[in-house]
Structure formats: C-alpha cells, structure tokens
Amino acid sequence: MSSPLHRLKSTGVSIWLDDLSRDRIESGSLKELISTRAVSGVTTNPTIFAGAFSKGAAYASQLAKLAASGATADEAIFEATTDDVRAACDVFADVYRDTNGVDGRVSIEVEPAFAMETDKTVTQAKALYEAVNRKNVMIKIPATIPGLSAITQVIASGISVNVTLIFSLARYRAVIAAFKAGITQAKANGHDLSTIHSVASFFVSRVDTEIDKRLDAIGGEHAINLKSKAALANARLAYELFEQEFGKEDWKLLEALGANRQRPLMASTGVKDPALPDTLYVTELVAPSVVNTMPEKTMEAVFDHGEITGDTITANYDISRAILAELEAVGISYDEVVSLLEKEGVEKFVVSWNELVETVSTALESSR
C-alpha cells in the first residue's frame, strides 16, 4: 500500500497504536491494522484500560469467574490486563520475528501509585513480565527520579522497558544513562544483549497545552507568535540528544557486544488544540528510528491526509534551541513547566487507575 502511514513507515518511523481493548483483539481489528495502517506495536496505560473496562461486556465472563474465586480488584485487573497484553503480543508475533525484535512490541505499565517507589516498581515490573510470558512485551516505567533506578534494575534483569512520562531534555539524558547502566549490568549478569530493547517515551502535545496557556496569559504579539512551537522544539532536541548519546564511545562498546539503542518514542501525539493541524505531531517528527505512538483518531487523520515529506527533525535543531530561548525570554520557565507536567502526568494516571479499580470492584461485587 502507498498510504501516508505506509510512507511514514518507509522513512524509518515505527507506528504504534496507543490503544488496546479485548474487543479490538477479539474482533480482529488489531490484526487488520498491521496491514491496513502499517501498525507495528501497541502501547497501553491505566487510562486506556479504564476506558476499555468501562465500555462493553468483553470482560464480564472473566470478572464473574474471578469474583467466584474471591479475587480482589487489584488481582482481577492484573489478570485481565496481562491476558489482553499476552493476546496482543501473539497478534504481533510475526512483526516481532520479522523485525528481529525491534517492533511487534506491546507495552504494559506498572501501577502508577508506585511511580515514586523504586522497589515496588521493580517487583511489579518483573511480575508483569512473568505473567505476560511473551518476549515481545515491554514494561512501562515512568521516568521519575525513583523510576530511574528501577529502569536500570529491570533492564539489568534482561527485561525490555518502555520508559514513559518524559518531558524534559535533562530527564531524558538521565533516562539514557539509566538505560546504559542497565545494559552494562545485564551483560555482567549474563544476559544476551541483543534480546533487550527499550524505548524512551517523550511526551509532546502536553508541552504545547501548558506553554500556550501561559503565552496567552502573557499576551502581546511576540508571545502569541510563539504558541504551538514549544512541543516540536522540545521533541526535536530530544532526537538530537538521542543521536549524541548513542554516538558516544561508551555506547559503541556496548553496541559491539550486541546491544540495541534505546529508541526515542513520540507520545501524546494527539493534537489538543483544534486550531492546529490534526497530524502536526506526526508529520513534523519524522526521522529514522523514531517510534510514534498514536491514538486511533490521529492515526486515521494521518492515513487520510498526512503529508510525509521525509526527515522533519534534524534540520531544525538550531531553530528549536532558539524557540526555547525565546520562551525563556518572554517569561516561560522551561524547568517549571516540565516539572509540573511530570507531576500532573503521574497524578492523571493515578486517577485513571482509581477509576479502573472502582469499575472492576463494582463488576466483582455485582457478580458475587
């Protein structure tokens, strides 16, 4: 096929769907997306599962059985979500094989309440990996300060990791360091480095949402002209950092031992401002080795009218630095914004997790 999504794939961008539900798996629509939309992976999070459990009856039978066995809501969520992710991993098994493990990945996230607790994150990451029991699963770990150590420990155990909730360039640099440390330890632990893969999920649209709100408050022509430029600048400089860090000698030594680079993943790519092009955070973030995880609405927009013109990242580093400098000059604190977004990101996933627990608790009670 020659759709914009297939052309995007030909540039070296991996297209992952930011959604999963049992209905999508059982209906065959997930498998169909592999050919019709060039989809090569799936990401999930507590918000996605909360939505899946609240819509329809796909989980009713399993929850009734779990209720009869006396399962708690947390136990039921663990079993049902790992079942879904295992089934999705099987759907993508051929993609995983054909790409030598690069794609065909399905991500499942540790409980967001553990975001500030290293040991609990590591314990649950290993439990999720064992429960899914598929080589193409990726365990999502948030890039909080306590999460950095967890990332290293989980990778050192030979488990592939999707690092999530990255907003700042400084934190991204720390994530890459945590990844490299994990790979070094994995080698010392006797693991085959070629089987370990990782992505670093850099959140995009939320940066514009927060900064544009502040620019509106500042007012004036210069501030208004800076609107909707921060997110792309930030993400493009993240790709520059990826190129720099994985071009260093310390990485070349690990790569010679079979290690795979941690690829940059562009997350939160659905456009929040209706005044912006609905394909903006896809078509303007194209470069080799990028993963773009898209909600279905964004994916369909790209399929329908996305304009793929090749690399839209690497020629824009200087412009991106200038944009961030101008934002500081008009009174936008980059450090304050990214710190707030990380805090809010964790909180939003906790809220979604609590909604999921409430939905499942109600279903279990009605089945007893």
Image (cartoon, rainbow, N blue to C red):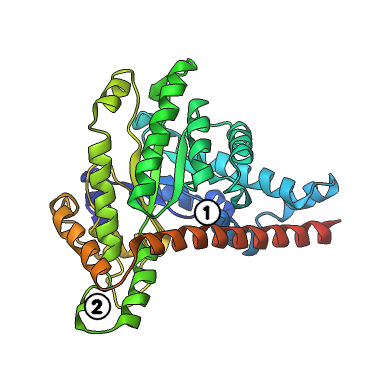
Give the quadrant of the C terminus.
bottom right
Return the x and y of residue 54 as percentages of the image width and height.
Answer: 64, 63
Q: Residues within 10 Å of mark 2 (few under 14, many from 20)?
A: many
Quadrant hosting residue 332: bottom left
Residue 315's mark? none
Compared with 312, 54 (above or below) is: below
Return the x and y of residue 155 as percentages of the image width and height.
Answer: 48, 30
Question: Contact (CB < 8 A) between labels 2 and 1?
Answer: no
Decide which of tag 2 and tag 1 comes sooner along the chain. Answer: 1
Residue at left offset 45%, top offset 44%: 163
Compared with 215, 81 (above or below) is: above
Residue indicated by mark 2: 223
Q: CA distance from mark 2 to mark 1?
A: 43 Å
**Along the horizontal axis of the image, is 199 left or right of 230?**
right
Label 2 is placed on what type of residue?
Ala
For numbered disc 2, what is the local secondary structure?
A: helix
Residue closest to the eye, 326 or 156: 326
**Along the horizontal axis of the image, is 256 left or right of 58?**
left
Residue at left offset 47%, top offset 53%: 29
Residue closest to the eye, 281 or 350: 350
Residue indicated by mark 1: 24
For numbered disc 1, what is the local secondary structure?
A: helix
Can you see residue 143?
Answer: yes
Can you see residue 9?
Answer: no
Return the x and y of residue 279 as percentages of the image width and height.
Answer: 29, 64
Of the two numbered discs 2 and 1 in the rendering, the one whose residue sits closer to the viewer: 2
Residue at left offset 35%, top offset 48%: 170
Compared with 274, 130 (above or below) is: above
Label 1 is placed on what type of residue?
Arg
Residue closest to the eye, 294 or 147: 147
